[in-house]
Image: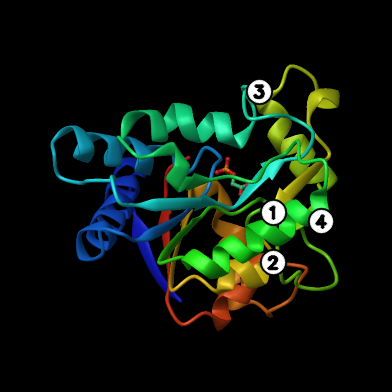
């Protein structure tokens, strides 16, 4: 794993956006694996600027997101589909049909997860963008006793529910389950960039230099051949 440190969030976001830009330039029909949360927002803003300056074209790009809350639909303002449309897709001229986010309202969850995993295999992820939870989760793969391999329904940990409650009116409004790519799904990506701000420093150190253990899900990335961790001192 390669680590690149930045002084500011702006510098980190700009660098991350350049990696995405390079990927899209080299392969216009590439597939981007995308993340939500507060950390990648600056990267998305940078890409929107590049799009507005005609420096990047998303017309042939496909995207596939890591996860979605279970039990809320894409129109809910806290759903990850809503987040992606509002913060990125609505502003970059991408075809919505080329953007994939799990359906949090799927009646048949097993079918939804299987089809999502099949799609990952079918289109293949060229570049996966990741954030990291305070507990070391990637996607919504929470610390547990094994590395889940495929897309699945997961019970969110108490710490994740608490962390995400900042976006909801009440703690009790936070969904307690989510559909997430598995650790194995993420590991299939050809290249991965993980973005983290200063407050995640400790868990990043554990993930990068500690034991590889499902107690720190991101530690599995030590076994991936092409991971770059971008971290900034700020925040
Ligand atoms: P954050 O979330 O970017 O809002 O810190 C990251 C995560 O929980 O994966």
Q: Earlier in the sequence, mark 1 or mark 4?
A: 4
148 lies above or below 212: above
The residue beneath circle 2 is 217
The residue beneath circle 1 is 180
- CA gap between label 1 and label 4 equals 12 Å
Q: Foreground residue, 213 or 102? A: 102
The residue beneath circle 3 is 76
How many numbered discs?
4
108 lies above or below 27: above
Q: Earlier in the sequence, mark 2 or mark 4?
A: 4
The residue beneath circle 4 is 110
Q: Quadrant of ligand 1?
A: top right
111 lies above or below 104: below
Q: Foreground residue, 159 or 110? A: 110
Q: Residue at x 34, y 44 (%)?
A: 8
Q: Would you say residue 87 is visible in this rendering?
A: yes
Q: Secondary structure at mark 4?
A: helix
């Amino acid at each position: 794993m390669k680590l690149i440190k930045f002084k500011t969030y702006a510098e980190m976001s700009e660098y991350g956006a350049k990696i995405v830009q390079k990927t899209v330039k080299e392969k216009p029909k590439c597939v981007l694996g995308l993340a939500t949360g507060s950390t990648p927002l600056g990267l998305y803003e940078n890409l929107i600027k590049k799009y507005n300056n005609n420096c990047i074209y998303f017309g042939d790009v496909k995207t596939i997101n890591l996860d979605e809350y279970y039990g809320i639909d894409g129109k809910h303002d806290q759903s990850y589909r809503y987040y992606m449309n509002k913060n990125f897709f609505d502003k970059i001229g991408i075809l919505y049909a080329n953007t994939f986010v799990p359906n949090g309202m799927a009646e048949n969850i097993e079918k939804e997860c299987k089809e999502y995993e099949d799609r990952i295999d079918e289109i293949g992820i060229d570049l996966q963008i990741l954030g990291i939870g305070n507990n070391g989760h990637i996607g919504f793969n929470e610390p547990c006793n094994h590395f889940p391999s495929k897309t699945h329904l997961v019970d969110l940990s108490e710490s994740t529910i608490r962390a995400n409650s900042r976006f909801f009116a009440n703690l009790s409004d936070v969904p307690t389950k989510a559909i997430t790519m598995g650790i194995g799904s993420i590991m299939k990506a050809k290249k991965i960039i993980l973005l983290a701000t200063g407050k995640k420093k400790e868990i990043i150190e554990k993930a990068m230099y500690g034991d590889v253990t499902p107690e720190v899900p991101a530690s599995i990335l030590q076994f991936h051949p092409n991971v770059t961790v971008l971290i900034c001192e700020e925040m």
